[in-house]
Image (cartoon, rainbow, N blue to C red):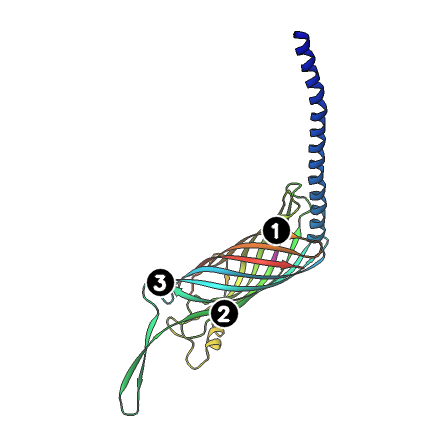
Amino acid sequence: MKTKITQKGTEAKGEAAPASRRLSFLIAIAFLSMVFPNQTQAQQNKDFLLSKNQFRVGLGATYSKTVDFQYSPTTFQSVRTNVQLGYSNRLKKGIFFTNLNVFLGSLTPVSGPDLDFYIQETDIHGSETAELNQLALSQLGFNLEIGYLHKLSKPVTPKTTLYLGGSLEENFTFTPGFLNIGTINYGSLNAKARLDYLLWNGKPLSFGLSVPLVSLVTRMPYHNSPNIPGRSGLAGFFMDNNHIETLNHFQDFRFSVKYHWLVSKKFTTDIAYQALWVHYYKPEHLTQAGSQLTLGFTF
């Protein structure tokens, strides 16, 4: 009995050993089939993302809140549509880039009554009439930025690449009508930083930071006044109202994260998030904070 049991156990072990080897072999093949395509795809991703000239088209939306004490302590909210155009030229030791962001949106009070006003008219017979209207605040404009990021020769880690540089930026916002709530224009010299982290799939996760060093800020000069008497709205906005400000008086901080979620040999699509915070103190404090989400196509 013992001999038979021993023989059966030996036979079972003999049959299990080839099965175990076959299973190990299949696992090894499956592992290699996953590893090598990923390495090939990662190499393709790297080749495209490091190409010399790239153009980007983006479409997104920005949600922001504005508190403008020049007109009212009421908080306004805005949803803007953004269309972005970009170009980048990857040099040996850095990246030259230019970005254009065109936006359009409307401002509405977060709480409280709507922006109602009355238009009073008197006819030739001296009869007065008053018409109730709701004020619609819309903002349209563009943001143009040209800059350069220099690649540091020594990376922080093997998977990270750090860029430091700067940019020249011009922001123009126009509000049709006679109330320019949240309207501020500026040209600034920015300090910028970018950190690329290479993920396991060969796609970089890019972090960006932008801070203004010196800015030329333009804002409507008169409290509750549409423009300088006798001049148009644009003339009143740009004449005798330019102030050179440093970081302690004008802040425009932006933090961004971008992920390339689909990459081929010729193009890539990305999703980008940006947090914005703007503050200025003349002639009354203005604060804006918002978040922007953009889908981009690079080729």
Of residues 160 and 153, the one nearer the viewer is 160
Picture quarter with the C terminus: bottom right
Q: Nearer the viewer, residue 52 or 151?
A: 52
The answer for how far apart the CA atoms under marks 1 and 3 are is 40 Å
First-in-chain label (1 vs 3)? 3
Q: In the depicted view, which residue is nearer to us: 281 or 18?
A: 18
Vertical placement of residue 31 versus 55, above or below: above
Label disc, if present, on residue 2 of the rendered structure: none
Q: Secondary structure at mark 3?
A: loop
Q: Earlier in the sequence, mark 2 or mark 1?
A: 2
> Does the magenta segment cover residue 164?
yes
**Residue at coordinates 55% horizontally, 58% vertically from top-left?**
294
Q: Position of residue 238 (x, y in %)?
A: 49, 73
Q: Secondary structure at mark 2?
A: strand
Q: Amino acid at mark 2?
A: Leu
Q: For the residue carrying disc 1, how many other residues have a C-alpha within 10 Å: few (<14), some (14-19), or many (20+)?
A: few
- The residue to which callout 1 is attached is 261
Looking at marks 2 and 3 on the same chain, the residue that comes earlier in the sequence is marked by: 3
Q: Residue furthest bottom?
A: 125
Q: Quadrant of residue 15?
A: top right
Region in magenta: 162-166
Residue under circle 2?
Answer: 140
Q: Residues within 10 Å of mark 2 (few under 14, many from 20)?
A: some
Give the dominant element type of the magenta stretch: helix, strand or loop. strand
Q: Which residue is mark 3?
A: 74
Decide whether residue 158 is among the magenta residues: no
Asked if residue 283 shows in the view, the reply is no
